[in-house]
Structure formats: C-alpha cells, structure tokens
Amino acid sequence: MREKGGIRQLLGVIRRGQKGVKTEQDFMSSSAQRPAIPVENIDEEKVLSIASKLGKPYPEIPFISRSALSFETTAVTDLKSSPYDQSVLSSSPHHVAYVARWAEKTGKIEVVVNRGEGELMWKVLQGDPSKIRFTKKASITKKASITKKAPTAGVDVICDVMEIACDYHEAFDVMLPNGKKMKSTRVDIGCFRVEDGVVSCPAIVSIYYMPAEKREYGEDGLLQSIDYTKPQIPGWMPRLCPKANFKDEFHWNKAGKCTGWTRTDSAGKKTEFTHDGFVVMTRDGQGRPLDVRRSLLMEWMQQMSPSALATAEEFSDLLPHLCSLYDDNNAPPQETTLAWRYVYEDESDAFGKPSPKDTVKFTYRPELCSRADLSEESGFRLPLMTQMMLGERTYVKYKSDFVMNGIRDGESLTDMIRSDSRYALKELNLEPPAKLKKMQFCPWRASTNDLWKLDMDDFEEKAASLLYELADGVYRMCLLPTVQGGSVRQSYFVQNMYAEEYAFAKLDRAYRRCTEAEARKILGKCRSEEDWKATIFTERQPISKEDLPKDVTKALALWQITGEIYIGILADYRGAFGMRQYFYVRVGEKSEAASFDYFDELPSRAIGNAVLDAYAGKREALNNFAVLLYSEIANPKNYNESAVVALLDRAARLGCPTATYNLGVLYYNRGEKDKARQYFEKAPLSETRDKAESEHPNG
C-alpha cells in the first residue's frame, strides 16, 4: 500500500472490501462512505484479494483549493466569542466543515476543487438529496500548490468551481451499515474523482445544523423563531452549538432584512434585541433603538455545564480560566464595553450604526453581595485586584444558580449551605423576606496594626490600567506593559507576583520572619506530611516558580504579628496563575493552631486591621469582622453563622449600636421578624448610620 500511494490506497481497498460494495457505484454510496466502519462489515478475504490485485494506483483524492460562503449571512445570536461567531468549523485539503450559524433557510457554499485528469462526481452521502442542489459555475486553470510531496507542484491544473445550495435540515434518520438507525443533523457531501472508470476516495464538504435548538421558517423562507428549550437531539456539544433556556422570535422588514428579535425566557420575561445583537434600553421618537447594551448572559451560559458539576472549591479555581476566555489581545477596549448608542444618518435610516460609549473603570458592584452595604459611602474598600476576583467569583456563582437552577434574589452557590438560606429556612418553617436587608459597617478607622499598605497609589495605577468593565460583573484583563503579547493568564501571574513582593517588603519591615522550625511547630497539625513535602519554606525573598525544586509546587512564609498571632503567605504554583493564599493564625495556650482565617485573595488594609483589632477585642472591629464573614468576603468557602452571631453579640455588649442593628438584620433575613424588631428598636438605623431610614421595618 505504501508503494502504491499510501493512505488513500489503503482507504480505497478497505472501503471496497466492505460486504455491500460490489461496483464503483456502490463505492460512492452513503453506506460505503460512513465515517466509521463496523469491523463486522469488512470482508477480510475480499480486502486481501483487492490489495493483492491492485495494479494502477487509485486516483488522487480531490484537492479542495478554496471554499467560502457565497451568500450574505444574518447572525441569529448575540454571541460574540469563538467558536460561536464563526461558520467555518474546520478546513483541510480534503475536507471542509461548516456550522449553519446563519438565519437564511438556504445556505450556499462555493467550492473550488482540483479536477486533474478525470471528472468530478458529487454525491449526497448524508442528508436529504431533495434539499441539496449543485451548480457548476465554471472550470478554471490555476497553479497547483507547491509542496514537497506534490510532483506536479507549480504546473497548471484544471479546477471546477461548484456552488452547493443546501436547505435547512431538521434532525433526520441515518441508516448505519449494521442496520441500525441514528439521528443526525450533519449533511455530508462527497466529491469523487473518476479516471478511466475508477473512483477515488471522496473529499468531503460537511454542513452541521445545530441539534440543540428548534427552528421555524415561514412560507416566505424567513426565520420566524429559534427555541433553545426544545433540542432535537439530547446532549450538548459546546464547540458546535450554543445552549440557552429561552426562545428568540425574529423580526423582518419588507425588504427581507432582519430588524432584531424578541427573547422570551422561561419566566415569560421579554427582552428586545437589535439586529446587531444589542439589548434595547431606550428608543428615539421614531421607535428606533437608541441606548443599547451588550448582554453576556448567553456567553456565560456556554461555560456553565462543565463547571456546574464541580465543587465550590473547584469552581473557584476555574475563575481565571473563565475570565481568560474573554481575553482578546487584538481587540481595542471600546469593542468590549457594555454601553453603546445608535447613530442614524437621517430620519429615513432604519438601522443606524452602534457606537461604543466611553469605557468605565472598574468599580466594586454592591449588588454582587446582597448581605452587606459595600457602597462607596460605607467606607469599605478593597484593593483593585481583590475587587475584581471577588466580583468575578460572586458573579459566576450568582449566574450559575440563577441561570441553571432558577434561584431567585441572587442567592449564590454558597447559599445552598448557609443556615439563613431559603433552603435551610424551609426546614424550620421560616419564610425569608422577599428582599434581604444589608448589614452596616462601623466607620473604618486607622489602626496601630496598620500593616496592609498594599493598595497604595502606584500599585493601583498599574492595576487600574488593566481593568475595563464589560458587563454585569464580567471583566476584561488588558496587557501589562511588561508583558508584550501577553494574556489574561500572564497578567494574573505577574499581578500575583507584584502583590507578594509588596507584602513581603511591608511585613519584613514591621514584623519578625519565622524560621521553618517555628512554622512547622505552629502549622504542623494543620498540614499533612504530603503537603509539607510539596512545600518549600522561605525565610528570605519570594520564590518564583522557576526556582522551585523538583516535585515542589508551593512556597510558604510566616511572620509573627503579636505573641499569639501570625500571618502567612502561601504561593501555589500548581495552576498556571500562581495564586496566593493569605491567612492569619492564632495560636492557643498549648502552642496549637487554635484558629485560621483565610482570604481567597490579598486582603486590604481594612480587612487585615479588622481581623487583628477584633482579636484585640475592639468593638467596632468585632462588628466589621462579623459583617465581612456574613457577606462572605472573609472565609467565603466556610460560612459559620454562629461565629457571626458571637462577634455581633460581643460587640453589642461592648456598646456598639451598629452591631445591635446588624443582629436585627441577621434575624430579619432569617424570617424571624419579631426577634429582629427587638434589635431594631434598640438600635434603629438612624442611630447607627445616617442613611436609608426607609429600610427600617417600621418605615
């Protein structure tokens, strides 16, 4: 076979060796050209006989020199990310595959194929022949491609230009060689070269119609609707077709141009979209879209399925990856902004052109955390990078539950196990309020333990240049000046290194670095022996990934803050982002690790001081630490409501009215309104913070 022409000869022999293939016409049939051939369908003696008698090599497989859509397409979704914005699935010299991401009922593909010395024959191998039409446009002469293996490289060859018109296919039955049937929405068209009555193996043109949707076309051939809640074939193919839980109904003008669509979700809510895929916010006097915005709901839904089965910890680890999916080094920032506005040439212009509004710098979005007042007025502030990661994580969890499980009022994945979640309260026959109240911070004050000066101006300036708001808590990471041609992954890695270097420098100036022996004694019972083997302890500078010994994936450092309080930094290089874990340890009387306080990302000066001052028994810090725990900014993976109650109760007994009010918030959100009213009467909101009297249950 190698001497006669290699793989094409082997394919020709094996396919001719199938039990149902007797003639060259049989060889060009659908059953003979299935993508996969059952072993039991191959006649081994027949294969050996054909191979032994093979004289002249079979004709070359037709060479596809060019293929392209030959009609103007209309987009059917607001998805802007790859692969959902592309119709070409794959392309090679002998196979091209398209995904029908267009609204038109009939798609047209122009294919240029090297005819060589013979003639070309086109056959429908899979699909409805009555819906597929072939039109030969021309025969042209062109130079053959120059390759090392092509003996005719650079010479003139004759090519046929064929236009394939294919109508929309719903799922259809495919008969397999073993007599069984299967459902498919893929159309396969074969192009065979015939020389002296001998047929080559085919080049294939495939068109894939998405099975995860149900389409309806009108008598005029225009697309009426796509219903994503009625898949034709079970299962989800994330690289081929998008998933969604709504129905889109399309609108067309008299000229047959799409003017937009109406999206109806499972709750019956309707959202209007422009023909460009923007959500309509306002209209002008003629009813034309004016202020519009991007919606990333469908973008995020494509990421939900693989991660929905993960644990909360695994899900958090996926966040940088999810964010990196939106990394486009070549796209200018204005192409990724949320807010747009349409501009029209004159009153007769029905479509106009969308123009992006100015980009908005990142700000923490209070609605991402429904249990604490995190507005600018609260005085609470996180470093920019920490804001982004907390916002990203909370947003993804919120969308995951809201989209996939229908949870109302923005409860996140961790709400499933919170003792004040609507699921836990049902077991106690308590009815949670329709809208949660927010706990209040005490004023953030300077502290003698002012060690977290990492959110300083120069650090924030570097970080601010990287972040632009996209939509609903989803952010795009731009390039660092020091990382040319970099990506989100590199940006995370470098930012984590910056933050760690700042932390080491600040802590070294203010506190004593612990030795490895001390760290092992303090942390010994909290870490397994396997974990210690994978960790290197540093008593000097941060250790980069390149400097780690073999089989070591983590670097640890520890400082003593007071006699019993320590702070540690753990750099974890198992992933590609070099994530850091910052934690406090309070050692008990017997030198045992009595308590750990972890933070997913670098805590701000405010959080660090709150924890340390709470340990010191300061009432305002006790209240603020409780709010951080309640809102899951601190220890988001291990919510403990009894700890929140204990902190607030201690702060209230020390004379903190805000803590008394926050106890009322806690019980109000649990549905225990009578108990909540007692605390609100002791410390109404007006006495704790001059703000929002309307939130008081008595108005």
Image (cartoon, rainbow, N blue to C red):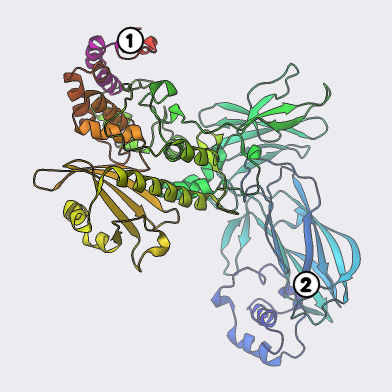
Say whether residue 671 is magenta. Answer: yes
In the rendered view, does 616 fall on the left or right side of 319? left
Residue 655, by quadrant, is: top left
Q: Is most of the magenta stretch helix, strand or loop?
A: helix
| Crowd rating for badge 2 (residues with CA inside 10 Å; few <14, some 14–19, many 20+) | many
Residue farthest to the front?
A: 509
**Which residue is denoted by mark 1 in the rendering?**
686
- Front in this rendered view, residue 129 or 435: 435
- Identified by mark 2, the residue type is Pro
Up/down of 10 relative to 602, above or below: below
Residue farthest to the top?
A: 699
Which stretch appears magenta?
662-687
Q: Is disc 1 placed on a helix, strand or loop?
A: helix
In the picture, the quarter occupied by the N terminus is bottom right
| Crowd rating for badge 1 (residues with CA inside 10 Å; few <14, some 14–19, many 20+) | few
Residue 54's disc is none
> Residue at image x 18%, y 28%?
617
Residue 587 coordinates in the image, percent (x, y): 16, 44
State whether residue 641 appears in this view. Answer: no
**Which residue is denoted by mark 2 in the rendering?**
62
Residue 10 coordinates in the image, percent (x, y): 66, 82
**CA separation, marks 2 and 1?**
81 Å
Residue 96 coordinates in the image, percent (x, y): 71, 62
Q: Is disc 2 placed on a helix, strand or loop?
A: loop
In the picture, the quarter occupied by the C terminus is top left
> Residue at image x 75%, y 58%?
129
In the rendered view, does 386 fall on the left or right side of 267? left
State whether residue 528 appears in this view. Answer: yes
> Residue at image x 22%, y 56%?
515
- Identified by mark 1, the residue type is Ser
Say whether residue 344 is magenta. Answer: no
